[in-house]
Image (cartoon, grey):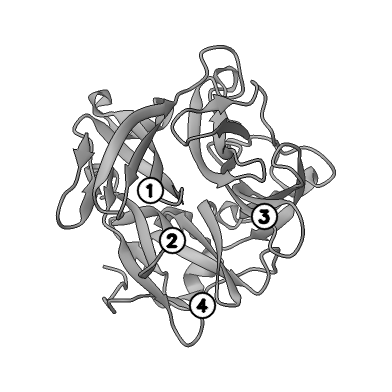
């Protein structure tokens, strides 16, 4: 099935909502992977606990062929037998494609998230790597994270949305993920970008958080380099802004996508100054990614619409550039201030 629309929506499924997505190019085609759930659930909030992962391909990021579901919760007892959430895909030195994704277990009502791996030779057919996670909040650096679920502070124990890149300044690989740190007075200042390292994409060591603060959740991180500067895109909701970050700005709270900046992918990272990059109330676009194309950087994410009017469709790519100060801006110069 080929799906294409004009305007703001590029990929919509008649019977499914689509949300968080991630992309990879195989040399010929763009591959989009995304979370999906049946609209027959009725309430969009239920989608998180009735989720599968879908796949589509395109030559130009505007006309897509949908290939259906490629990953569902495990059909036997496993760390991911309830949830398979957001991830990323890289190609290893062995020529295989590696999917890193978030899993949640029925035994814990999905409240504890961990990271798993699947592999593929063609990006269409995937094989899970065991029934256990490849990374959890364990080891010498675990004490720097919120490792247990504290329902008085948060609805879950956060460890999700893995983003993997090659280590640009050495051998091996780096992983970034959504997490929280412990010990903050303001729960909305506990959000963190977690970090791990691997020599071979199989064995991972938990590192100290790459960043924490500003928000209660820094979801769906994406780390990339442009020029000599590093960027870490993330998304968050208006209700998760910390008091300290809120009073530092002259704009109202919004939901959407902002980013961190650094001179090195291992930090130190800081919140990009100025207005929140791509936010609105109600939320317009969420879980955005930057995709590098021959025409330059494009931002892609799903149309949100807010809790009362959830849309759940992938939006057209929009061009993004870097200004003289090294900050991300919309290339068409549209005003992205709070609405």
Comparing labels 4 and 3, the label whose residue is closer to the camera: 4
User: Looking at the image, which residue is at 71% across and 47% down?
Assistant: 145
User: Looking at the image, which residue is at 47% across and 88% down?
Assistant: 324
The first of marks 1 and 4 along the sequence is 1
The first of marks 2 and 4 along the sequence is 4
Residue 41 in the image, given as x and y percentages of width and height: 27, 24
User: Looking at the image, which residue is at 35% across and 63% down?
Assistant: 279
The Cα atoms of the two marked residues, 3 and 1, are separated by 45 Å
Q: In this view, does 291 lie to the left or right of 338?
A: right
Q: Residue 290 carries which label?
A: 2
Residue 67 in the image, given as x and y percentages of width and height: 32, 32
The Cα atoms of the two marked residues, 2 and 1, are separated by 17 Å
What crowding class fits label 4: few (fewer than 14 Cα within 10 Å), some (14-19), or many (20 or more)? few
Q: Is residue 34 left or right of residue 221?
A: left
Q: Mark 4 = which residue? A: 273
Q: Residue furthest right?
A: 140
The first of marks 2 and 3 along the sequence is 3
User: Looking at the image, which residue is at 61% across and 23% down?
Assistant: 79
Secondary structure at badge 4 equals: loop
Foreground residue among 32 and 306: 32
């Amino acid at each position: 099935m080929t799906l294409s629309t004009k305007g703001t929506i590029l990929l919509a499924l008649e019977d499914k909502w689509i949300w968080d997505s991630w992309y990879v190019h195989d040399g010929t085609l763009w591959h989009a992977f995304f979370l999906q759930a049946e609209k027959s659930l009725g309430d969009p909030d239920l989608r998180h606990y009735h989720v599968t992962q879908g796949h589509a391909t395109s030559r130009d990021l505007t006309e897509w062929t949908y290939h259906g579901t490629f990953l569902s919760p495990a059909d036997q007892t496993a760390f991911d037998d309830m949830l398979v959430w957001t991830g990323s895909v890289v190609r290893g030195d062995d020529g295989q494609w590696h999917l890193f994704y978030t899993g949640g277990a029925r035994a814990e009502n999905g409240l504890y998230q961990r990271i798993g791996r699947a592999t593929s030779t063609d990006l269409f057919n995937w094989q899970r790597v065991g029934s256990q996670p490849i990374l959890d909040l364990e080891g010498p650096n675990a004490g720097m994270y919120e490792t247990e679920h504290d329902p008085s502070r948060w609805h879950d124990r956060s460890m999700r949305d893995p983003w993997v890149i090659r280590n640009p300044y050495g051998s091996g690989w780096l992983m970034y993920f959504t997490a929280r740190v412990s010990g903050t007075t303001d729960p909305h200042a506990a959000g963190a970008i977690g970090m791990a390292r691997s020599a071979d994409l199989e064995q991972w060591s938990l590192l100290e958080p790459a960043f924490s603060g500003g928000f209660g959740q820094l979801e769906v991180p994406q780390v990339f380099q442009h020029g000599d500067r590093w960027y870490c895109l993330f998304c968050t909701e208006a209700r998760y802004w910390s008091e300290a970050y809120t009073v530092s700005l002259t704009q109202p709270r919004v939901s959407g996508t902002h980013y961190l900046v650094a001179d090195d992918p291992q930090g130190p990272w800081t919140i990009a100054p100025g207005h929140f990059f791509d936010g609105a109330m109600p939320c317009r676009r969420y879980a955005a990614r930057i995709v590098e194309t021959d025409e330059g950087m494009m931002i892609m994410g799903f149309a949100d619409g807010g809790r009362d009017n959830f849309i759940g469709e992938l939006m057209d790519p929009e061009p993004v550039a870097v200004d003289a100060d090294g900050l991300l801006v919309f290339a068409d110069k549209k005003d992205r201030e709070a609405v």
